[in-house]
Amino acid sequence: MCLPGEASQFQLPTRLLKIVQERAEFKVNLKEEYGGTLRYATLSHCWGEHQPLRTTKQNLDHHLKEIMWSSLPRTFQDAVIISHGLGIDYLWIDSLCIIQDDEADWAKEAARMKDIYARSYVTLAAAAGKDSRHDLFPREPEVVSVGKAENSRRCARYTVWTTGVLSTRAWVMQERLLSRRTLYFYEDEVLLECPSTLRCQCGARQHMNDSSENPQPCGEETLELAPCSSDKALFALATLWDELLEQYCQLNITKLSDRLPALAGMAEAFENGGVFGKYAGGLWDGLFLPLMLWYIEPRKSPKLEPPSEADPALAPSWSWASVRGAWCYRRMPFSDDIYAVAKHHEPDSVTQSHNSFTAKTGVVTIEGCIATATIQHDPLYLEGAQDRTYADRFKAQNIKLVADEEYIEMWPDFVLDALLKPVNPGELVYCLPIQGKLGSEPQVIQGLVLRINDQDPALFSRIGVFQSHLWFGSTEEREVKIC
C-alpha cells in the first residue's frame, strides 16, 4: 500500500529522541550517537503562540541525559506513545532535536529537512492542534485501524491538506510532501496518506492519482527527477514548481525570515534531480530569467504585509521570497523569445553557515537593454489611501508607467507610497525587458521594473514587473546588477 520504508541506511539526523518504556512509564532523552541502522518517526505540529519545550545551549546536556516526562507537552507525549506503539523507539521533533538558540546548528539542520522527513518511517501529524498543548488524538483509547478497506469511497469527510490548523503552516507543506507516509490525527479520526493512496478510519480510501486541486505527497523515490529531454518537459516541471509556490506563498509562517528555509527540503529534492540546475534565492539556474517574472495577485492576497526597513531582508528583491506575509504567487507565461542574458546569478553573500537553499542575500548580473519611465499613481487611490489596510491599498493602487507618452502596465511588488523611501508619482524608474521581441512590430514584452538601490547607487532593486506591446527604449545592451 505504501513504500516499504526499510531501516534507514544513511546518515541519521544529528539528534533523535530515544524512547524507553519501563513498566507503565516512558523515559525520553536526546541521543547524538547511534549504532547500526534504525527506524525513527517524525512529528509535524504547530508551534502556535505558546512555544513548546525547546532544546537550547543551556539545557542540551540535561536533555542528553533525560527529558522529564512531565515537562513534555501533550502533543509530544502522545507522539512518544504512538511511536512506541508502532514499534519505533526513536522520534524526531524539531523544537527538541535542533538547538533553537544556536544559529549554526539551526542552519545546518534546516538544510537537512529533506532527508529528515523523506527517510522517516512515518510522520505523525497533529492536524487539529493549535499548539503543542493539545492532545494528538483526544479520544478514549481503542484499537484504530486504517488498513485495507472493503470499498473505494472517497475520504469525503476530510480533505487532507485543506483541513485543520496544521495545513495553514508553511513549514508543514514540505514535511507532508517529502514524507513517505503520514498519519493525520484529527479530533475524532485518523487518516493515513502516502504517495499511492489515502485511507481513513471510516473505511474510505482514495487513490492519489485521482484528480485533486492539492499537491500530492511525493515521497523520496518520486522526487528522484531526471533531467528533461525537451523544453516542453522542462516547462511542464516548471509549472509544477509554480503550483507548489502558489500553494506555499499563501501559507502562514511565524518568522518571515524562514520563508526560504521552510522550502529548502523541496528545493533540494528538485536540485538533486538535476532538472533545473542550481537553486539560489528561490529561483532556478536553468530558467532563471523567466522565473524572475513573478508577480502578486492582488485580489487573492488579503494577508500581504508591508516591507519593513527595520527588519533584515528576507531575500534579494528579485526573489519572490522577498514579499512579506501570505500572498498569491503568479508568474508571466513562458515565452520562446528570451531577450536578456543572465551572466551571473549566484548569491554573492552566501556564508558557510547558510547554503544556497536558505541564502537571503545576493546580486544578479543581467545583460540587456534598459529604458526609463516614470511612475503614475491613480489620483482616486491617493485620496483615500491612508484609511485602508495595507492589503486593500495594494489591491486598490492602479500603477502605470509612462514612457514616450505611452502608458505601460505595471504589477508592483508592494504599495509604492507606503515605503520609508516611497516611489513617488513622477519618479524615474528603469525597465529591463526579459522576454519578447524588441522592434517596431507589436509584441508582448515583459520585464522587470527597477529603481536605484538606496544603499549602493551602482545596484538596482526590483519594484515590480511590466508588460508592453511596444519597446520604448534603446536596443543598446548594458550590464545591470540587481540586489
Image (cartoon, helix red, strand yellow):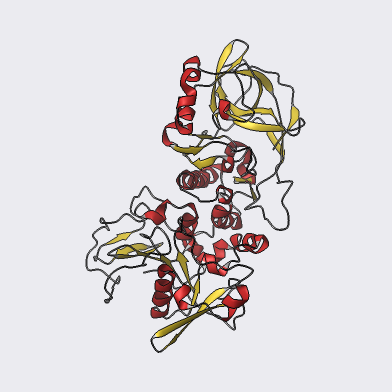
Q: Where is residue 102 in the image (x, y as percent from the top left)?
A: 65, 63
Q: In which quarter of the image is residue 108?
A: bottom right
Question: Can you say which quadrant of the picture contains the N terminus?
Answer: bottom left
Relative side of 129 to 311, left or right: left
Residue 329 to residue 111: above or below: above
Q: In this view, does 71 lie to the left or right of 471?
A: left
Confirm whether residue 131 shows in the render: yes
Along the line of sight, the residue nearer the viewer: 201 or 382: 382
Q: Which residue lies furthest to the bottom in this view?
A: 23
Compared to 36, does 455 lie above or below? above
The quadrant holding residue 122 is bottom left
Percent position of residue 85, x then y: 38, 79
Compared across the picture, whether 261 is left or right of 172 comes to right
For image coordinates 45% across by 28% down, the residue present is 388
Residue 11 in view (yes/no) = no
Residue at horizontal 77 percent and vertical 31 percent from the top: 458
User: Which quarter of the image is occupied by the C terminus?
Assistant: top right
Q: Residue at x 52, y 79 (%)?
A: 38
Task: Report x, y in % for residue 131.
Answer: 42, 60
Residue 290 found in image quarter = top right
- Position of 314 relative to 78 (above/below): above
**Which percent across, then down, holds residue 148?**
28, 71
Looking at the image, residue 6 lies above or below residue 209: below
Pick the front one: 480 or 435 = 480
Tally of numbered discs: 0
Q: Residue at x 63, y 17 (%)?
A: 374
